[in-house]
Every structure is written in structure tokens, then in C-alpha cells.
Image (cartoon, rainbow, N blue to C red):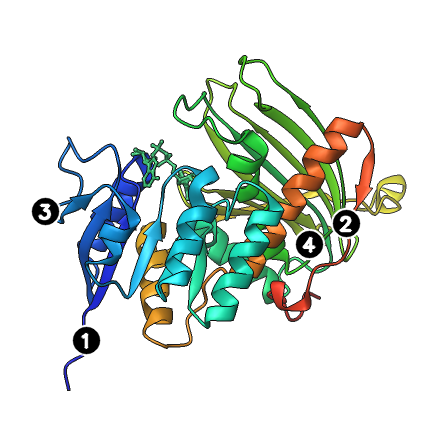
Amino acid sequence: MSKRTLRAGLVGLGAMGRNHARVLSSLDGVELVGVMDPAGDSAGAARGAPVVATLPELLALGLDYAVVACPTALHEEVGLGLAGAGVCALIEKPLAHTAAAARRLADAFDAAGLVAGVGHIERFNPALQSLRSRLEAGELGELFQVVTRRQGPFPRRIADVGVVKDLATHDIDLTSWVTGCDYASVTARTVCKSGRPHEDMVAVVGELSDGTMVSHLVNWLSPLKERFTAVTGQRGCFIADTLTADLTFHANGALDTEWEALSAFRGAAEGDMVRYAILKREPLFVEHERFRDAVEGKDADIVTLDQGLRTVEVAEAVLDSARRKTSLPLQSSHPRNLTTVAQRS
Ligand SMILES: NC(=O)c1ccc[n+]([C@@H]2O[C@H](COP(=O)([O-])OP(=O)(O)OC[C@H]3O[C@@H](n4cnc5c(N)ncnc54)[C@H](O)[C@@H]3O)[C@@H](O)[C@H]2O)c1
């Protein structure tokens, strides 16, 4: 029996929407039936699909699901429109511009019984997927610290949210996901140097529910583009570069020493370094395959709206801490928000 082709729509044909159009138009079992963007499609990025200016026009094409890649401040309005029309949705990160809006979206899709996910694409990066499996298998033993750095030049097009909600939400989501732990507290400082109303640089120090220390340095003010994640634990340190999708392990040394004073020192010593050969599939393609499978009713691992909501809540705590120049404890999240890492030691 032949499988039915899913009818997909796309909302927003900007920098990210063009990538979604490329993937949607080449995905098995899916047809890109229409795109909505009030600015039209002068570059031909819709790949032959009709381009309309309003959501009712897009819905009239008959959709099984839609990908939402319009500016973050519009995710709520568009998402609620899709949920109200019974259409499943993959919504770009961050889920919404405020935690209250993210909660309304999660509630609406939940009440409608529709499949919905958030485009936290770093979860589909091969380096982080391999890192997570290795942590889950206990290769690092007890975790001590997660450090991320996400720096780069200013993106002129993002004007509706600051760097915390736009970029640091990647770091918040990936840190919870690779460790399987929620955030327990955050302390942050921000600066705003570009003349926009929102912050463009943030430093965060936090603690996860199991006591693991985290730090995130994220900004739009660096000529250097960097996407760095280091996880340090009992047996060494993993470094993931999500620009090149490389994962490296720096093992703690295990050489015996006859030097009495040194043998009493029980800290880490330098050991072997391994860069893993990993299959590098395009993260956006994998994200779309998983979401298509979920819409088809298969058991696919997607980023849930509850998890997307939690990430926005942590981002708001970061901004609140920076505003009040204080450390903020976080209420624990709903248990269904977390994907647990089974055994680490
Ligand atoms: N997952 C990732 O790594 C990633 C990367 C970039 C952007 N994003 C997210 O994707 C979203 C879009 O970001 P972008 O960089 O593509 O922005 P962009 O400004 O390049 O594109 C936004 C597009 O939305 C269109 N638009 C405006 N109002 C609209 C409406 N009411 N309905 C439909 N379309 C509308 C604009 O005309 C524009 O073409 C944001 O939420 C952003 O956070 C995610």
C-alpha cells in the first residue's frame, strides 16, 4: 500500500525559511504546497510552490503541517492560527518571544491534540548527538561542568528579540538535552552596545539540577564565529564544535609516577586526545525527517513545545538576573520536559 504524501506549508521565507523551503522540497513523503510571506519571493526561494501573503490563504491550500520561520515575535499569532485550524507545526526557535506566549502555544497544540515541535536544530548536530550518546553511556563518569561559547557578528535582520532569546536559547536547550538535567539557577550579566533596545552580549553562570556547573558566553559582537561546547567530568573533557560537527575527547592521563609529591596530587593530568569519525548528516534535514515521522504517527524524537517553553523560561530568568544583578533560583520544570540520561557513572 503506498504511503500518503504529507502536504506541508511554510510561513516566512527569510534567511532560515529559505533553508526550510530547500529541505521541504526534497524530503521523501512530503510536498511543499505553499509558502506565506508578505514580502513575496523575489529570489525564487519557494522552489515553485505558490507564495501567498496571509495565513487564511495558506490554510486554504490544505495542509497537514506547517513550518513557522517568521520573526520570533510573530510565532505566537501564527502558531495559534495553525492550532485553531487543526494543522501540526514545527516552530522555529525560540518557541516564542515570551514565556507566557510560549505557554499559550504549548497549551493550544496540547488541547488540539496536534503534533508540534520546536526547531532547536543543535539537537540534530552530529557532534552533539554523539556527545549525548557518550554521556548517556557513562563515558565521562560524573559531570563537573558544561561550557558553551556562541559568538559572531551582528545579524542585522534580527530586531525583535535580543541575543539571549535569539542565540543563547540554543545553548540552554543543548545543555539540558546533552546532560538530561534541568537548570536549577542562573546568574547573568548583559551589555547592549549596538544601539538596539535589546542586549547583544551575555555571560551566564548557572547550576543544573544535579549540581553540574554551566557557563555560556554568547554575543553578536565578535568578528570571530564560534560554536563551542565543552563538557568536563571525572574521566576527561569532550569538545564539540557545531560549526564543523567535530567531537573530540581529551582523556585524563593515567600514568603512574614515582615522584611522591606528584602522586599525592589527584587532579586531572593530560592524557590521549581522540577526534571521532562521525557520520555528518545535515542537521536541518534530520530535524525535518524526525518531524515528518512524528506527523505520520511514528515514534520520533522531536523537541516538544513543553521543552521549548522551558528554554524560554530559563532565558527569561537569565535576563531577569542581568536586570536585577542577582542570582535567580528556577522553579523545577514539569517532568515531561526532560529527556533523561539514564546512567552516567
Ligand atoms: N534554527 C536556527 O538555527 C535558526 C537560524 C536563524 C533563524 N532562526 C529563527 O527563524 C525565525 C526567522 O529568522 P530569520 O533569520 O529567517 O529572519 P528573516 O528576517 O531573515 O526572515 C523572516 C521572514 O519572515 C517574513 N515575515 C514577516 N512577517 C511575516 C508574517 N506575518 N508571516 C509570514 N512571514 C512573515 C519576512 O518577510 C522575512 O522574509 C526566527 O524565529 C529565528 O529565531 C532559527
Residue type at tag 2: Leu
The amino acid type found where label 1 is placed reads Arg
Of residues 297 and 28, which is closer to you in this image? 297
Other-residue count near label 1 (Cα within 10 Å), few / some / many at <14 / 14–19 / ≥20: few
The residue that disc 2 covers is: 330
Location of the C terminus (image quadrant) = bottom right
- Label 4: few (<14), some (14–19) or many (≥20) C-alpha neighbours in 10 Å: many
Question: Which mark sits nearer the N-terminus, 1 or 2?
Answer: 1
Q: Secondary structure at mark 4?
A: loop
- Of mark 3 and mark 2, the one earlier in the sequence is 3
Circle 3 residue: 48
The residue identified by callout 1 is: 4
Q: Secondary structure at mark 2?
A: loop
Q: For the residue marked with disc 4, what is the amino acid? A: Arg
- Res. 60 image quadrant: bottom left
Kindly tell me whether mark 2's CB lies below 8 Å from ligand 1.
no
Mark 4, ligand 1, within 8 Å: the answer is no
Q: Earlier in the sequence, mark 3 or mark 1?
A: 1
Which secondary structure lies at badge 1? loop
| Labels 4 and 1 touching (C-beta < 8 A) | no
Secondary element at image label 3: loop
First in sequence, mark 4 or 2: give its number: 4
Between disc 4 and disc 1, the foreground one is: 1
Tell me if residue 250 can be seen.
no
Circle nearer the N terminus (3, 4): 3
Q: How far across and down, in percent of the image, does residue 101 sit?
A: 56, 48
Residue corresponding to mark 4: 235
Marks 3 and 2 close (CB-CB < 8 Å): no
